[in-house]
Amino acid sequence: MSEHAPHAAFLEAVYLAFEAVWSHKLRSVLTVLGNIVAVTAIIAVVALVQGMNQSVTTAIVSEAGAGAFQIRRVGIVTDEDEAERARRLNPRVTLEDAAAIRELADTVQAVMAQAESRGRVVYRDKELERARIEGVSEDFLSFSSYDVERGRLPTRAEVRRKRPVAVVGWGVADRLFGDADPLDKTVKIEGVHFRVIGVSEKKGAVFGQSQDEYAVVPLGAFQKMFGSRRSLALIVKPHEPELMEQAMDDAAVALRIRRQLKPSTENNFGMFTSGTILAIWSAATSGIFAVLIGVVALSLVVGGIVIMNIMMMVVTERTREIGLRKALGARRRDIIWQILAESVTLSTVGGLVGSAFGFAVATAIERSTPVPATVEPWSVALGVGMTAVVGLFFGLYPASRAASLSPIEALRSE
């Protein structure tokens, strides 16, 4: 019997706590309002940050390429002045640079030259004003980021001979052709006719910007439309992912040799991986996340103080009840259990309500705005757990105060 006594006492305390909360509904709601707001903010903020992280990660990996690195005229810069200085001092990246890397870097498997611009795509009476036009060299077939849902990719011979063929994004096919089959249809890109030979899989949107409104054409055909003097981007793939760092070093050495840079001269090109961009994004969002969580934690502390004040009032209201229980043999532990159980129950109920509100807010934002949201189970557990800890911590003083009451003095109180 004694083994089950603590368990029974705990269940009784929880039952009494729920009874007390239910009998004072308005006061209970006002008491935990701070916790509700705080947990709502936790769930919503985490959902938005996680949703943005997943969306941006997918977009960056798709753009920069998984298991590959990029070489550009300008690397990752922190301000416009730095970018302008790099554009002024760094020479354009050319096909000759790509050839040098292929020849001198033994750890490199493929080097794709790439160029991008915005252009108009027209089919009969329908058109897209600012679709992304991408020109690629023949090594693009070595990169998994290029695929098709229907049709096929250009062959190496078609790319090498600058054939007017194009793979269009899902969004271009949908807006220009609707339900009709776009394969073997002729579209005009910046006034030049191209035959559609493939349609890529749907990628979706990032912050409301479609990732499917593009056309991929041979680099030579791209340069005929937009000029050959623009700087290229080189996407470099090592033989094995484990050779990434060595391949980056080999590619850098190859470019320095081709550009005849002295040992004391800095690189006049930018080199980075998708991981580099993701690290910058993560650092930016981590700072925002930390500030928001700090504000939420302050809200929880304020909510905890409100709970402590209310529990002090509860102890005062129940002075005679507590005195009577102690006179009938209730121990100090029993009184502490009773007050703590009510404090933790109040706070946890606020956490549960806040979790529901947070989920609703995140869902509403995702459906009504371009911002993605992903509710993580651990954020719900974190929110509810934090409110339980707040209830426990701020309920300790009222519980100790109640347990220290003298039975005689408590029974005398009015």
Image (spheres, rainbow, N blue to C red):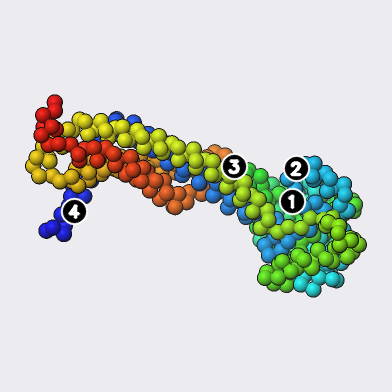
Tell me where residue 47 appears, x and y as whole percent. 50, 46
| Label 3 to label 2: alpha-carbon separation | 27 Å
Give the residue type that dot 4 points to.
Pro
Residue under circle 3? 370
| Label 2 to label 1: alpha-carbon separation | 9 Å
Are circles 4 and 2 on residues that touch, CB within 8 Å? no
Helix, strand or loop for disc 4:
helix
Helix, strand or loop for disc 2:
loop
The residue lying at 54 percent from left, 38 percent from top is: 368
Give the residue type that dot 3 points to.
Pro
Residue under circle 4? 6
Image mark for residue 79: 2
The residue lying at 67 percent from left, 70 percent from top is: 242
- Mark in front: 4 vs 1: 4
- Mark in front: 1 vs 3: 1
With 78 as the anchor, is 301 left or right in this view? left
With 168 as the anchor, is 49 left or right in this view? left
Which of the two residues, 229 or 196, is positioned nearer the viewer here? 229
The residue lying at 51 percent from left, 49 percent from top is: 374
Q: Is residue 333 visible?
A: yes
Image position of 176 with respect to 323: above or below: below
| Label 4 to label 2: alpha-carbon separation | 64 Å
Give the residue type that dot 2 points to.
Asp
Residue 35 occupies quadrant: top left
Give the residue type that dot 1 points to.
Ile
Crowd class of label 4 (few under 14; some 14 to 19; many from 20; radius 10 Å): some
Residue under circle 1? 76
Q: Earlier in the sequence, mark 3 or mark 2?
A: 2
Image position of 190 with respect to 166: above or below: above
